Amino acid sequence: MSRILLIEDEQNIAKGIILNLELEGYEVVHANRGDLGIKFYKDQEFDLVVLDLMLPVISGEDILVQIREINEKTPVLVLSAKDSSKSKVRCFNLGTDDYLSKPFNLDEFILRVKRLLKRSSWTKKEVTIYKFGANEIHFSDFKALCQGEEYTLTEQEVKILTLLTQNEGEVVTRGELLELLGYKKDSNTRTIDNFIVRFRKYFEENPKEPKHIISIRSVGYKFIK
């Protein structure tokens, strides 16, 4: 049985979430304050964290930072009344895996939970090392060995690299990458561009003349081994 930590101060929303998660067979631990949420996370093992942003005592963003300092792998689904691109970009940069704006459809919420838990289960079971050039990506350990340097990868970086390497030699569209991170496929955010710049610094001998991560103008990117 998967264990989910719900950090949400709005009682009515929390009750609805707990009821629906328990009907799906999940065990739910609820914290109605930020400080309790991070205490529960430190003291117990969880397969997923569902995190509200606007919380008493400690904000959701601060909790997200602390969670990522403790564990890069625990999936986090942020719930927020903030629907701006700025808020979403900030949370993804801080390490969230998904972002759902309030009010939300419970069926969609459950589907997102299942997707994150499935991905989490895959990363726990599989030990995958992908080698190309002088580089290695250790997906299950969330690290990369590049030109003799070791880098820690975030959950978002692993998601994008997994999609790119699984489609080696084929174009992955910008929209597909945006949807992978929880954005609408026609979003104007530069989040994907920032990840690509970072990957080229990791993996390319000359980031300005990439040989592995190639831009396909107005379409997306292609990974070449």
Image (spheres, rainbow, N blue to C red):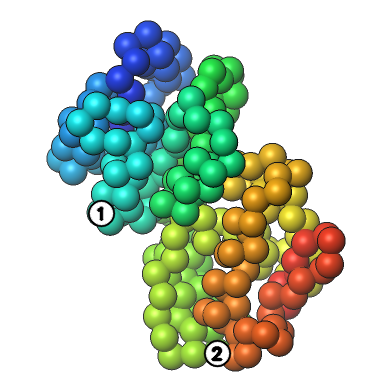
Label 1, on which residue? 70
Please rate how many residues cluster around mark 1, counting C-alpha atoms within 10 Å: few if below 14, some from 14 to 19, many from 20.
Answer: few
Asked whether, in this view, residue 26 is left or right of residue 175, the answer is: left
Q: Alpha-carbon distance for marks 2 and 1?
A: 30 Å
Asked whether, in this view, residue 21 is left or right of residue 88, the answer is: left
Occupied quadrant, residue 195: bottom right
Please rate how many residues cluster around mark 2, counting C-alpha atoms within 10 Å: few if below 14, some from 14 to 19, many from 20.
Answer: few
Occupied quadrant, residue 75: top left
What residue is drawn where x is 77% and y is 56%?
Answer: 173
Q: What secondary structure is found at the residue carrying circle 2?
A: loop
Disc 2 or 1, which lies upstream in sequence? Answer: 1
Q: Position of residue 218 (x, y in %)?
A: 84, 61
Is residue 152 in view from this perspective?
Answer: yes
Q: Position of residue 61 (x, y in %)?
A: 35, 42
What residue is drawn where x is 47% and y is 54%?
Answer: 93
Label 2, on which residue? 134
What residue is drawn where x is 46% and y is 75%?
Answer: 144
Residue in front for this viewpoint, 141 or 126: 141
- Amino acid type, residue under disc 1 in the picture: Ile
Q: What secondary structure is found at the residue carrying circle 1?
A: helix
Occupied quadrant, residue 27: top left
- Amino acid type, residue under disc 2 in the picture: Ala
Count up the numbered dots.
2
Q: Position of residue 169 (x, y in %)?
A: 78, 72
